[in-house]
Amino acid sequence: MNTNTVQLGELVSFLSGFAFKSNFFNTDGDGLPLIRIRDVKIGHSQTYYTGAYDEKFIVADGDYLIGMDGEFNIARWNGGKALLNQRVCKIDQVSPRLDRDYLARFLPRALKLIEDATPFATVKHLSTKSLKEIQIPLPSLIEQRRIAEVLSRVDALRTKRRESISLLGDLTESVFIDMFGDRKNIYTNWPTRKLGELLDFLTSGSRGWASHYVDEPGSLFLRIQNVRRNELLLNDVAYVSPPETAEARRTRVQPGDVLLSITADLGRTAVVPDGLGEAFINQHLSILRCSALNPHYLSAYLSTPVGQEQIMGRNRQAVKAGLNFDDVRSFSTPCPPMELQDEFAERLASTRSLISSHQKHLGELDTLFAAAQYRAFRGELWDEPVV
């Protein structure tokens, strides 16, 4: 099928932002918000500008903006009247032959291709020249609008699914507070003991195992990026051929172990699940082995605001964050009845099962969206004659 393409510079003009003087910047809300690169994706700015400006650099809700450094992102601005700072550009004038929403649906993949092909020493830079040289398929306006509508519908489903997953993630903390209390009453609701009195085993992970790294298959080597807020992530794991040493035996995890990050990004927690296989931890993590508490209760407690206060309150490092074993042992730990802890663990398992189902559906929607994009911009969804 004929997939007539046109150079984007023939259809669109871009307005690059201005280098506003930083001595007029503030975070007090005085003046107009100033859109910097980091604000493109999040859709709002906490930096304001009180100096003089040219009206042409004003951005309004509905304008499409492109970040020109680092990741080349495009997003629709909905943060109110604001000013366009340097290294951000705005889609300015658009030909009547081109639908803006169709353009916005086309550009993310085109920008990603440019980003991947752009060499860099420190930060990647995008030029308006590169933007103007992009070749865009140009079906009729009717087809452009249909394609944008189809992609918007699928994308809206993806957004709703992500929101559902986020809400389910927040539900864990809500259930915990409902069952055990919050910072106002959790320590008075239940007997409280120092964590060190409850632990059967406490250790930190192995150092200097780079020489033991192997490609798959191998034993898992869990690092700080594999531990999040009461969750174990296995999408970016390293593999090792462990040495036969006392250190390896000490740092090998068991099902039910609670992992806690004790350096760098403090306070991440996760429970080692059944069936994980042989796995070890690196020096940024510690193993908390505790038969006196349900591990899912302990991990959830440490990841709640109450538990995080315990952790951050003991971080005494001025430069590099860190906890020692005495710090961990000193955590005040509420001890509700084990049957209540077990009930919480069952409810947590049900919630995670639902999250897993939603994540699977989100993956299917992501695949559908990518396929629809690919077909649409190759002309395979066009029904109308090409202009």
Image: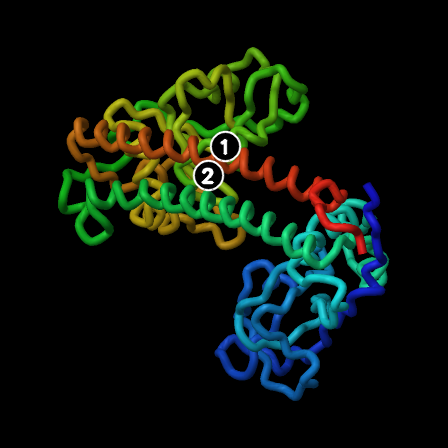
The residue at the point 25 percent across, 28 percent down is 293
Q: Residues within 10 Å of mark 2 (few under 14, many from 20)?
A: some
Q: How many marks?
A: 2
Residue holding disc 2: 228
Q: Is residue 345 visible?
A: yes
Q: Is residue 322 above or below residue 293?
A: below
The residue at the point 45 percent across, 43 percent down is 161
* Residue type of the residue flagged with mark 1: Leu
- Identify the element where label 2 is drawn: strand
* Residue type of the residue flagged with mark 2: Arg
In the picture as drawn, the residue positioned furthest to the top comes out as 244
The residue at the point 46 percent across, 30 percent down is 204
- Whether residue 167 sits left or right of residue 245 in the image: it is left
Q: Nearer the viewer, residue 74 or 289?
A: 74
The residue at the point 19 percent across, 35 percent down is 335
- Identify the element where label 1 is drawn: loop
Q: Is residue 133 above or below residue 374?
A: below
Q: Quadrant of residue 331?
A: top left
Q: Position of residue 16 (x, y in %)?
A: 75, 71
Question: Cβ–Cβ below 8 Å for labels 2 and 1?
Answer: yes
Residue holding disc 1: 233
- Whether residue 278 sits left or right of residue 302 in the image: it is right
Mark 1 or mark 2, which is nearer the start of the sequence? 2
Q: Is residue 344 above or below residue 221?
A: below
Question: How much space separates mark 2 and mark 1, taking CA atoms?
Answer: 7 Å
Name the image quarter holding the C terminus: bottom right
